[in-house]
Image: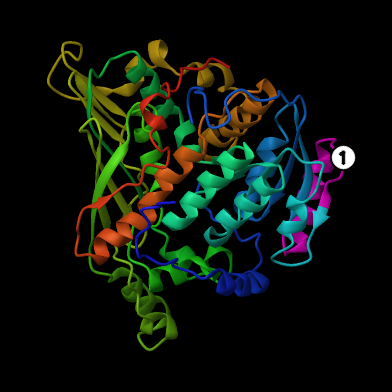
Amino acid sequence: MKTNRPDWKPMVGRREFLRWSALGGLGLATGGFGLGLGRGLAGEQRPISLVRIGIIGVGARGMTHVRELLKIDGAEICALCDVDESKVAEAQKLIKKAGHPKAKAFTRGPTDYRRLCESADLDLVLNAVPWALHTPICLSAMNHGKHTATEVPAAETIEDCWALVETAEKTGKQCIMLENCCYDRPEMMIFNMVRHGLFGSLLHGEGGYLHDRRKAMFADSGSALWRTHYAEVSNCDLYPTHGLGPIAQYMNINRSNQFTRLVSMSSPSLCLAEYAAKKFGPDSPQAKRKYTEGDVCSTLIQTVAGQTISLTHDTHSPHPYSRKIALQGTRGTVRVYPEEKIYLEGTTKKEEWEPLENYRKQYEHPIWRQLAEKSKGAGHGGMDYIQAYRLVRAFQKGIAPDMDVYDAVAWSAVVALSGESIAKKNAPVEFPDFTRGKWKHRPPLELVVD
């Protein structure tokens, strides 16, 4: 089988990762954080009235999934896995408080997820562990007859992307990447506006992940136990999907449109060493480490339809949080950061921005209109609840999820491909066609109302 696999190796070996996991706990998951329904990999499936879920990794991010899923009717958390038994105990308390049966615990070490995946009483295995185990857990779950959902990114290499696709196709099981930013309120509203043609033909999109993570990367716990190492061994866009996911959905990627190629380049790597020297001293081990990941990674993607997408990754320099969401069409443009603003030709009275809020009454996404009250107080401004609701709802109705395995790997592939482009002195790199041509005939996501 031709995989179009680049000569770009995984940034963190899994054997090394398992050693870290035993020391720090799988519960120390990422702290990082789709719209309508479309026929996905397996199409219509058997409806599941009660979705039985196993969660692997119940640290900061995993515990958020526990809280949100406990609010969803028809979802039951039946199994929990973490090397940190106290995290499992904490999750069990939440489950008991919600009036649900006690979940089965899997706490025998960093590979005990395999035993969970073998359990016969689960419909869905969800993982919120560090990046290096996302693909192995998804593969294990599908090979044991379970649907699976993973935190972002779904894969670090093109080889792993193909493994996810082939396993999902072979088993007929869904492999869903939990890109919660696709469920944020302004992004979903823009999706609604795109579907109503307000921006005309789409020309260009922007997105990114600009989040000053320096303090977290030098902490004594949490993702610092594994995430900082990536800055020492990689030079790529490590975290592209928060900004890319919504834009890909606006542009119907994998559903009549496709990524074709990208070019990436990276700035010098200066900020982490400077931060460490100031915080720990210039002679400290933290300051003397060699950091290879550029502080700012810029990527330009082109689609089959000729559209362009600009991505930015920056977790090392000082700046306010932003995902840089923006969209340009033949009839207008919209932007989410630092303010939600829009300009529509012939509608906006002057040639200047107006608040996006002016259009909320007419173009609020139906899902947010339906669930705004229930999502109050949920993680990341409510998007985590919307994501949990849509995930469970798809299985309950026996329909394809909002995001399938092709979305998971196409968006995640930017990690490996950007690294290849940078390593080849910013050379263009072709995207593999993970759908093997099916993108030409797959219908766009629908504007769902439930």
Magenta-drawn stretch contains 141: no
**Residue 355 position by quadrant:** top left
Q: Residue at x 72, y 58 (%)?
A: 114
Q: Residue at x 39, y 27 (%)?
A: 255
- The quadrant of the image that shows the C terminus is top right
**Where does the image place residue 71, in percent across and percent down from the top left?**
71, 32
Residue placed under numbered mark 1 in the picture = 101
Q: Secondary structure at mark 1?
A: loop
Q: Residue furthest front?
A: 1
**Residue 158 position by quadrant:** bottom left
**Where does the image place residue 367, in percent across and percent down from the top left?**
53, 20
Relative horizontal placement of residue 154, taking residue 56 as reference (left or right): left
Magenta-drawn stretch contains 98: yes
**Where does the image place residue 401, in percent across and percent down from the top left?**
56, 29
Q: Residue at x 65, y 74 (%)?
A: 23
Q: Residue furthest left?
A: 351
Q: Can the viewer see residue 123 in this picture? A: yes
Task: Indicate whether 281 appears above or below 367.
Answer: below
Q: Can the viewer see residue 210 in this picture? A: no
171, 313: nearer the viewer:
171
Query: What's the coloring here?
Result: rainbow
Query: Which region shows up in magenta?
Result: 82-104
Q: Tell me if mark 1 has few (under 14), some (14-19) or many (20+) residues whose alpha carbon lies within 10 angstroms of its own.
A: few
413, 194: nearer the viewer:
413
175, 239: nearer the viewer:
175
Relative horizontal placement of residue 81, taking residue 7 as reference (left or right): right
Relative horizontal placement of residue 427, taking residue 62 as reference (left or right): left
Residue type at mark 1 is: Pro
**Residue 420 position by quadrant:** bottom left
